[in-house]
Image: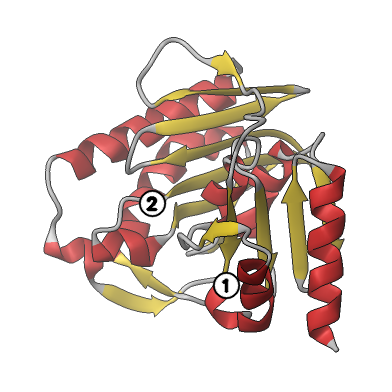
Amino acid sequence: MTPFIETTLIAAHEIANILRNGWQSEFGDYSEIGAGGDRTAGIDTLAERIYVEKLSKFGRIDSEESGILGSGDATIVLDPIDGSNNAISGLPYFGSSIALERNGKVEEAVVVNLANGDCFYKYDDELMQGKIGADYFRPVVKRERATVGIFEKAYANQALAMALLRRKRKFRSPGAVALSLAYAHYVDFVIFAGPRRRFDFAAALWMCEGLEIVEEDELLIVAKERETASMLRKLADEKKD
C-alpha cells in the first residue's frame, strides 16, 4: 500500500466515523452549484474538507465541489461523495472516488463505500478490496456466477431498460456510478448511459482494466464476458434507431 492510498483510507475512515455517530441535519443542507455542475450539500463539504486536509501534500486537487485547489505536479481527481442524494435520503449506497494522476494518467486510485465500509484501491496492476479501518486487504477476484447487473441512469434510458427486462437480464440502478464500477468484477455488468464527468469515472473506470469495456460518447458498458458486452452494445445500438 502506497503513502497516498494509506492516507486516503485514513481520511475515509475519519469521514465514516463521523457518519456513524449519526446523521446531522446540516449534512443535507444545499449551498451553491459545485464545479461539477451539481448543487453542493453539507455532506459533500464535510468530506471534501477532510480529503483536502489529508491529501493536499500529494498534489493539487481537482474536486467536484470546489474545482482546483492547491498546486503540485500530480493531480488528485476527487468526488468527495459519490451518491450524495442517496446519503441524504438514507439509502446505504454512497461513497468517495479519488484518483491520483500524473501526466494525465491515473497511477493510484481509491473508491470507498462509506455506507457499508467496502473499499477498493489500485496501483500498478494490483486491485485490492477490504474494509475501511481494516489492516487486511485481498485481491479482487471475479464472481463468475453473478446474476445481477447495474444500470446507472436506467430511468433515463427506458427503451434499453425494457429490452434488458425482455431478455430477463436482471439489473439494479443504485445511483452512485463510481461505486457501481468498483463492483464491476462482482456483478454481471455495469451500464452507464449519459454524459460523463471525470470526477465519477477517473478512479473506478481505471479499476475496470482487464474487463470488457465498451466506450462511446454517451454509453459505457463494462462486463466480465465479451459475449455480454457485445450483446449489451447491440441492444443499445438498436434502441438508438
Q: Residue 67 location in percent, x, y?
A: 56, 63
Q: Which residue is identified by label 1?
A: 154
Dot 1 crowding, Cα within 10 Å, few <14, some 14–19, many 20+ = many
Q: Residue 235 location in percent, x, y?
A: 80, 71
Quadrant of the snapshot with the N terminus: top right
Q: CA distance from mark 1 to mark 2?
A: 16 Å
SS class of the residue under badge 2? loop
Q: Which residue is identified by label 2?
A: 93
Q: Earlier in the sequence, mark 1 or mark 2?
A: 2
What label sits on residue 202 in the rendered view? none
The quarter holding residue 196 reads bottom right
At 38% from the left and 51% from the top, the residue drawn is 93
Q: Residue 135 location in percent, x, y?
A: 42, 10
Q: Residue furthest top?
A: 136
Return the residue nearer the eye: 124 or 233: 233
The three-letter amino acid code for the residue at tag 1 is Ala
Vertical position of residue 33 compared to residue 65: above or below: below
Return the residue nearer the eye: 30 or 216: 216
Return the residue nearer the eye: 54 or 171: 171
- Answer with left or right where residue 44 lies relative to residue 157: left
Contact check, label 1 and label 2, Cβ < 8 Å: no
- Answer with left or right where residue 226 lies relative to residue 87: right
Vertical position of residue 95 compared to residue 128: above or below: below
